C-alpha cells in the first residue's frame, strides 16, 4: 500500500512553522561519525526516510546507533562487512558518502551504486577521482563499487564541477589522511561549512569551507564530538514559496536567512513582501505577483532544489516566466503533472517558459522525485478543489511531518493509502 496526499486547496496559509534540521547536512554528518571509534552525537537530525536509511546502514556496518527526539548517538567501535547494505543504498544517493569513511577505518569498501531521485545521471565519477587522488583504488563489479586503500595521503584535487557530494567525500577522507589536501573548485554550500565545523570538532584541521578552495590538514587520530545540524534551507524555501503561492501570512522559524539569499531576492523581485528577523522570516500577502527569470546554479546561486517549487508558484503569475536548469538534465519531468493541472509550460532543452494562467485545476498527479513532490503540493494548496498526489514516499525522504506542518498553517492535507482511498 502506497501513501498519497489528498489536498483541498484554495485556502491561504497563516501562522508559524518551525523548520527542521537539514537533511543535506545530516547525511554527511552521520557518515562522518564513522571516521572515529569514539562516540559522536548529532543533534537536529530530522525524522526522514533518508536519515533513517543512513542510520540503518551505519547499524549494518556494526555501529551502535540510537535516535531520540532529533538527537542521534553513533558509536562505531568496530566496522564489519558491508555486504548487507544494498536494500538501503539503492534508495538514496547519499550512501556513496560512506566510501571515504570506510576506506579510512578499514582500508576497503564495497557499496552498490547509489539510488535516489530520477532527475539526472549524477555520476559518482568525481567522488572516485577525488578519492583516487588520495590513494584509493576502485573496481566496478556487477553494480557495486569495490574500493581499497593501503594508505591515504593528502594531495591536490581539482574538481571539474563543484559537486557537493564529492567535496564532502574528499573532505572526510582527507581529514583522517596523512598530510595536506587542497580541493580546488570545491562546492561552497552551507552544508559543506557545517561538515567542516563537525570535522574540526573531531580534531581535523579544515579551512576555506564555503569558498572554492578548501584545505585539509589530515589527522589520523580523530575523536568523538557533539554537533548540531544547521536548519534545512530547502524546507524553509519550500514553505516560503507555499506561503507566497497561497497569498498567506506565515512566520518561518529556525532559519538562517543568509543561506537563502538568492531565493529571497527572487521572491522579493516577484513582489512577495518578506521581513527578516533573527533566525526567522515572515512572508506577507502580496497584492500582485510578477513574472521571473530564474537560472539554477551552484551555491550561492539559485538552488536547483527549489526550482520546481518556483515553477508551481509562477504557473499562475500573469505574464511569461522562464526557468533555465543547468544542474540536472531531467529535473523538468514534473512539468507534465503541472500541465495536467492546467499550467501552460513549454520546454526547450534546459529552458522552461511558463505562461501564467488565471488558476489551476485539481487533478490526480504523482511525485516524480522529492522536490517535484513539493512543487505539486504547492500547486495543490493554491488550487480550489481536491488534488490527489501519489508516490509521496519521495516527500517522506526530505520533509519532516509535512502534512502536520501544513495543517498547522490551516491547509487541508490528508494522508491516505491507495487501498483505503478505494473503500
Image (cartoon, rainbow, N blue to C red):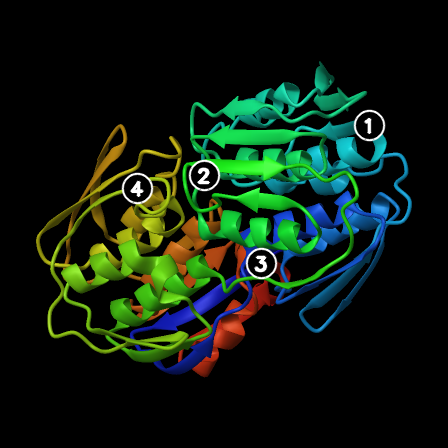
Q: Is residue 208 left or right of residue 42?
A: left
Mark 2–mark 1 CB contact (< 8 Å): no
413 or 388: nearer the viewer:
413
Residue at 67% from the left image edge and 39% from the top image edge: 175
Determine which of the numbered discs, if any, sits on residue 107 in the image: 1
* Residue indicated by mark 2: 187
Q: Which mark is residue 296?
A: 4
On the image, numbered disc 3 is attached to which residue? 396
Q: CA distance from mark 1 to mark 4?
A: 38 Å
Which is more toward the observer, 421 or 417?
Answer: 417
Measure the alpha-carbon separation of dots 2 and 1: 26 Å
Q: Nearer the viewer, mark 3 or mark 4?
A: 4
Q: Mark 1 Cα within 10 Å, few/some/many (few <14, many 20+)? A: some
Residue 403 to residue 94: above or below: below
Q: Earlier in the sequence, mark 1 or mark 4?
A: 1
Q: Nearer the viewer, mark 2 or mark 3?
A: 2
> Is 263 placed above or below 216 here?
below
The reply to whether dot 2 and dot 3 touch (C-beta < 8 Å) is: no
Mark 1 to mark 3: distance in Å? 34 Å
Q: Nearer the viewer, mark 4 or mark 2?
A: 2
C-alpha gap between disc 4 and disc 2? 15 Å
Amino acid at each position: 500500500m502506497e501513501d498519497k496526499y489528498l489536498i483541498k486547496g484554495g485556502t491561504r496559509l497563516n501562522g508559524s512553522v518551525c523548520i527542521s534540521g537539514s537533511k543535506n547536512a545530516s547525511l554527511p554528518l552521520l557518515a562522518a561519525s564513522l571516521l572515529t571509534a569514539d562516540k559522536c552525537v548529532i543533534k537536529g537530525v530530522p525524522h526522514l526516510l533518508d536519515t533513517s536509511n543512513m542510520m540503518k546502514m551505519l547499524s549494518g556496518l556494526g555501529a551502535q546507533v540510537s535516535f531520540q527526539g532529533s538527537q542521534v548517538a553513533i558509536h562505531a567501535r568496530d566496522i564489519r562487512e558491508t555486504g548487507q547494505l544494498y536494500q538501503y543504498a539503492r534508495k538514496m544517493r547519499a550512501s556513496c558518502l560512506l566510501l571515504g569513511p570506510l576506506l579510512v577505518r578499514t582500508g576497503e569498501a564495497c557499496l552498490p551504486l547509489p539510488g535516489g531521485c530520477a532527475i539526472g545521471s549524477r555520476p559518482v565519477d568525481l567522488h572516485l577521482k577525488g578519492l583516487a587522488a588520495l590513494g584509493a583504488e576502485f573496481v566496478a563489479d556487477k553494480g557495486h563499487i569495490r574500493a581499497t586503500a593501503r594508505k591515504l595521503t593528502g594531495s591536490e584535487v581539482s574538481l571539474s564541477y563543484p559537486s557537493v557530494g564529492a567535496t564532502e567525500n574528499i573532505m572526510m577522507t582527507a581529514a583522517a589522511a596523512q598530510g595536506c589536501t587542497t580541493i580546488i573548485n570545491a562546492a561552497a554550500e552551507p552544508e559543506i561549512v557545517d561538515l567542516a565545523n563537525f570535522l574540526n570538532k573531531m580534531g581535523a584541521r579544515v579551512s576555506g569551507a564555503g569558498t572554492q578552495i578548501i584545505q585539509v590538514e589530515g589527522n589520523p587520530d580523530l575523536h568523538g564530538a557533539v554537533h548540531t545540524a544547521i536548519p534545512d534551507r530547502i524546507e524553509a524555501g519550500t514553505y516560503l514559496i507555499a506561503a507566497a503561492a497561497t497569498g498567506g501570512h506565515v512566520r518561518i522559524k529556525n532559519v538562517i536567512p543568509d543561506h537563502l539569499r538568492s531565493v529571497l531576492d527572487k521572491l522579493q523581485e516577484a513582489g512577495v513582501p518578506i521581513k527578516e528577523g533573527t533566525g526567522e522570516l515572515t512572508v506577507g500577502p502580496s497584492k500582485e505577483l510578477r513574472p521571473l527569470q530564474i537560472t539554477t546554479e551552484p551555491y550561492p546561486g539559485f538552488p536547483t532544489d527549489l526550482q520546481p517549487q518556483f515553477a508551481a508558484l509562477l504557473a499562475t503569475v500573469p505574464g511569461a516566466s522562464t526557468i533555465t536548469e543547468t544542474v540536472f538534465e531531467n529535473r523538468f519531468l514534473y512539468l507534465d503533472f503541472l500541465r495536467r493541472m492546467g499550467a501552460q509550460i513549454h520546454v526547450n532543452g534546459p529552458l522552461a517558459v511558463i505562461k501564467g494562467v488565471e488558476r489551476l485545476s485539481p487533478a490526480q498527479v504523482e511525485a516524480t522525485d522529492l522536490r517535484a513532490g513539493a512543487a505539486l503540493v504547492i500547486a495543490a494548496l493554491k488550487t480550489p478543489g481536491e488534488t490527489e498526489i501519489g508516490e509521496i514516499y519521495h516527500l517522506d525522504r526530505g520533509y519532516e511531518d509535512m502534512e502536520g506542518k501544513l495543517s498547522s498553517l490551516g491547509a487541508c492535507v490528508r494522508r491516505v493509502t491507495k487501498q483505503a482511498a478505494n473503500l
